[in-house]
Image: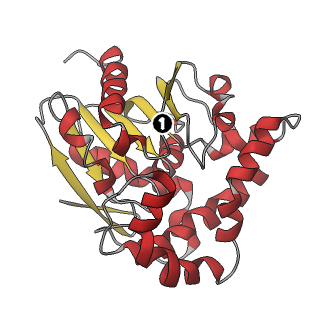
């Protein structure tokens, strides 16, 4: 099915019993909904599982301009999907990488129809902005060193050229060499990689320069892969300052834990959802 939201047409996919609690999985960059392929069947045994291609990726449309990729717009995309697949009950959200960043925006929106949230390798950028203003520690330096690619993504012309001619055509090989994973590579991978750069350019500088106060009472589970090359534990060390109900879990995995350790992630997600499942 397709859901219309803020000038974008979002491709949405469902699996499992619709009468069961709904779990919405939000993918990161440069993935599509297929990054959840190993996790979906495990969760679909107990839940109504929904995935979708975020704007600019996979089978969803790719609006032009940075304004179309700002965090409030991305949050409203998630709300549109929720309204379409679970109009009468809040859902449980599980997100990874940029999916986590944009889902934090939704989770910290008052009145969000979200019963619980599991964030894998993706902080709230506003929380990071406040964290960066603290007295510098080794954790700050560690994250800066891990974030070198974000600077590259802000260089005019360089990142799109790299994605079109170097990274995109070789993405499967690159992911295998760097992370030991073979993610599903969409036929739109080059477009997805180029278009997704807008996520970084539209949000990083504004949010880190002028972080907002973003709080939530939604129960949050932070899953930190211990061998993540891109997102360190430091950026989520202040989560308890912003969320009233937080549980932390570490997984001995790299960045794409939902691929390499799908059974472990499924167990953590199921445990968190079960602890916060509302009676029917």
In the picture, measured across the screen, residue 160 lies left or right of residue 179, that is right
Q: Which image quadrant is residue 93 in? A: top left
Count of marks overlaid on the render: 1
What residue sits 47% from the left and 65% below the top? 174
The quarter in which the N terminus is drawn is: bottom left
Towards the viewer: 262 or 268: 262
Towards the viewer: 234 or 278: 234
In the picture, measured across the screen, residue 252 lies left or right of residue 214, that is left
- In this orientation, does residue 62 appear? no
Counting from the top left corner in percent of width and height, residue 121 is at: 52, 42
- In this orientation, does residue 186 appear? yes
What residue sits 30% from the left and 18% below the top? 274
In the picture, measured across the screen, residue 109 lies left or right of residue 184, that is right
Counting from the top left corner in percent of width and height, residue 65 is at: 54, 76
What residue sits 22% from the left and 33% below the top? 43
Counting from the top left corner in percent of width and height, residue 152 is at: 68, 70
- Judging by the rendered image, the residue that carries numbered circle 1 is 119
What residue sits 57% from the left and 19% below the top? 244
Q: Which image quadrant is residue 266 in? A: top left
Towards the viewer: 228 or 123: 228
The quarter in which the C terminus is drawn is: top left
Counting from the top left corner in percent of width and height, residue 80 is at: 33, 51
Towards the viewer: 32 or 208: 32
């Amino acid at each position: 099915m397709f859901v219309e939201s803020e000038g974008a047409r979002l491709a949405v996919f469902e699996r499992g019993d619709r009468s069961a609690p709904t779990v919405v999985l939000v993918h990161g960059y440069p993935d599509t909904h297929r990054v959840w392929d190993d996790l979906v069947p495990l969760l679909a045994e107990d839940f109504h599982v929904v995935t979708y291609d975020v704007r600019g990726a996979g089978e969803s449309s790719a609006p032009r301009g940075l304004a179309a990729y700002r965090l409030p717009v991305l949050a409203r995309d998630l709300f549109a999907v929720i309204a379409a697949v679970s109009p009468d009950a809040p859902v449980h959200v599980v997100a990874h990488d940029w999916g986590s960043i944009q889902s934090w925006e939704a989770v910290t929106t008052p009145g969000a129809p979200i019963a619980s949230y599991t964030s894998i390798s993706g902080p709230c950028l506003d929380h990071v902005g406040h964290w960066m203003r603290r007295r510098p520690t080794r954790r700050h330096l560690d994250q800066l060193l891990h974030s070198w690619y974000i600077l590259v993504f802000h260089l005019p012309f360089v990142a799109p050229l790299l994605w079109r001619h170097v990274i995109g055509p070789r993405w499967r090989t690159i992911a295998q060499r760097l992370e030991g994973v073979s993610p599903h590579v969409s036929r739109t991978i080059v477009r997805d990689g180029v278009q997704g750069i807008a996520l970084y350019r539209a949000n990083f500088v504004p949010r880190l320069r002028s972080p907002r106060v973003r709080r939530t009472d939604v129960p949050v589970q932070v899953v930190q892969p211990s061998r993540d090359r891109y997102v360190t534990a430091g950026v989520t060390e202040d989560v308890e300052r912003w969320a009233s109900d937080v549980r932390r879990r570490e997984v001995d995995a790299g960045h794409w834990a939902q691929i390499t350790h799908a059974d472990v992630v499924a167990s953590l997600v199921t445990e968190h959802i079960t602890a916060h499942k509302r009676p029917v």
